Structures are given as structure tokens and as C-alpha cells.
Image (tube, rainbow, N blue to C red):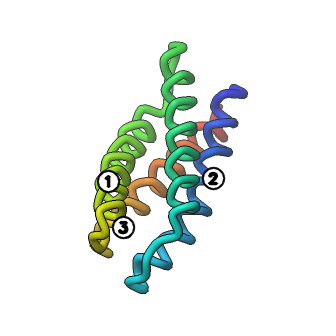
Amino acid sequence: MTILYASIGFFALAALFGLYLLTFVLKGRETPKAVVFTHGPLAATGLILLIIYISRGGPGPIESLVLFLLAALGGLYMLFRDLNGRQIPKILAIGHGLLAVTGFIFLLVFALNK
């Protein structure tokens, strides 16, 4: 269970950094790269811990995993656009966040019902 709670913690931190980044994207401003390079690894760590938790067997929050993986793909696409100096589409940034938040809610519901 500790791995599950650690995963939740990393995702929560990533969400805070993500909200901050979203404000830059919505304003059409350049994202602070230190925050970009912190947000991704925090979310990736949460994702890896979630995969470890699920791989140990038993019922797992598969829905959360799928949503986080989709969000990660969108995040990688946005990262490459950002690093190439291209503007990040606002709808993509919002969709990325909504996928991640939905996955996070499913993960919290799973953890609280465990």
C-alpha cells in the first residue's frame, strides 16, 4: 500500500506543477523550463510506482493507469513542441490536464476503498 500512497503523492506534486504550467500555456507565454523539467519526472515517478503496484498482482487501478499513460503521451508531445520553440495548443494542454486529473480521481477512489 505504501507504493500506492507514494504514487499518489508524486502525482499530486506533478499536478501542482502542471497547474502552474497551464497558466503559462493559456496566456501564450513561454513555460519556465525548470518547472517543465520538474513536472515530467514527478509524474513519471508516480506512473512507475503505479505500474509497480499493479504488477504485484491483485485488483489494481487499471483505469487510472490507462488515463495516466494517455496523459503522458500528450505530455511528451507538448514537451517536444515546447523544446522546439513551437506553441503548445491550449486544447491539448487542457485535455492533458483533464486526463491526468480524471486518472488521479480514479486512483484516489481506489486507494480510499482499499
Nearer the observer, 27 or 30:
30
Mark-to-mark CA distance, 3 and 2:
17 Å
Please determine whether, in this image, residue 96 is positioned above or below residue 9: below
Front position among marks 2 and 1: 1
Judging by the rendered image, the residue that carries numbered circle 2 is: 12
Please determine whether, in this image, residue 20 is positioned above or below residue 5: below
Q: Residue furthest top?
A: 57
Look at the image and tell me whether residue 105 can be seen: no
Please give the name of the residue rendered at 63% of the width and 43% of the height, measured from the top-left corner. Answer: 8
Disc 1 marks which amino acid?
Gly
Please determine whether, in this image, residue 41 is positioned above or below residue 16: above
**Dot placed on the residue nearer the N-terminal end, 3 or 1:** 1
Dot 2: element: helix
**Dot placed on the residue nearer the N-terminal end, 3 or 2:** 2
Judging by the rendered image, the residue that carries numbered circle 1 is: 74
Give neighbour class at mark 2: few <14, some 14-19, many 20+ (Cα, 10 Å): some
Q: Position of residue 64 (x, y in %)?
A: 45, 41
